[in-house]
Amino acid sequence: MFDTKRLSALLPDPERLSSRQKRELSLLGSLLHCTPHHCDFLHEPSRIQADHTGRGFVLSGPIEEASSYAEVLELGYLDGHPLPDLNGKPFDTETLESLSGLHATMLASTLQPTPIAAPLSQMLRKALAENITASDGPVLTLYMGHDDTIAPLLGMLDSHVKAPGYAQDEIPVGSALGFALYRNADGSRHVRVVFISQSPEDIRRDPNRAPLSWSYPRVPACHGKGGTCTMPEFLKALHL
């Protein structure tokens, strides 16, 4: 278990991160019909610190609570539920994309910084490296997880994702982070990072027929053709 009290001092300033989301916080306040005497969380200072157990982090301030509200609205939209209007304007995909930035900021604050991402993703990075470098490795390996599984791995790769209909670095419901292995005729191997998602509008309309959207996140440590990684570059990007 990592030392949260020591690591909390190494994390990015959550006040700076939340200040970038002023428009989105105002949008959420309008949807929730906040007044100067309600929704106090919108005006609290942003902090991140070790919890009382010393084994986790506590994020406080606008982003912590706002990200939860934003995620609820996001899930409600995907499930086809009626949602609050914005000054007479129906809740639409533009509103969802803006609000999803609040959840993405929460991930950026608590899961993607290297001091947190390294220990959280250690076992997954090790397993991924073992499978992808094995000469007789499996054709397909599927790891089940959540946004808090993908976010630390993206943090370690210093990579970013943009799913259609969502804010930068939001990790939507049902999305997947993949690693495709290519073997060349000369025996060399390359890895390409793949991100798979679906647009919220398509899921709301018909979740069983929503088409997949494929993108290929850039990994700064990799310089292969088409953004691929040589095997040494990929292992270096995994910090292994």
Image (cartoon, grey):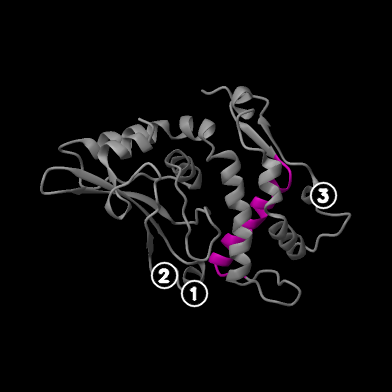
Task: Indicate the position of residue 100 as horizontal and vertical percent values.
Answer: 59, 58
Q: Which mark is residue 205?
A: 1
Q: Residues within 10 Å of mark 1 (few under 14, many from 20)?
A: few
Towards the viewer: 52 or 5: 5
Whether 171 is drawn above or below 98: the answer is above
Task: Indicate the position of residue 193 as horizontal and vertical percent values.
Answer: 34, 50
Query: For the C terminus, which image quadrant?
Result: top left
Q: Which residues are magenta?
A: 60-81
Towards the viewer: 201 or 215: 215
Q: Earlier in the sequence, mark 2 or mark 3?
A: 3
Q: Residue furthest right?
A: 37
**Which element carries disc 1, helix, strand or loop?**
helix
**Which element carries disc 2, helix, strand or loop?**
loop
Residue drawn at the location 88% of the way across and 56% of the way down? 36
Towards the viewer: 237 or 32: 237
The answer to which image quadrant residue 129 occupies is: top left
Residue drawn at the location 80% of the way across and 64% of the way down? 33
**Which element carries disc 3, helix, strand or loop?**
helix
Task: Indicate the position of residue 139 as horizontal and vertical percent values.
Answer: 20, 47
Q: Residues within 10 Å of mark 2 (few under 14, many from 20)?
A: some
Residue drawn at the location 61% of the way across and 46% of the way down? 106
Labelled pair 2, 1 in contact (Cβ < 8 Å): yes
Q: Which mark is residue 210?
A: 2
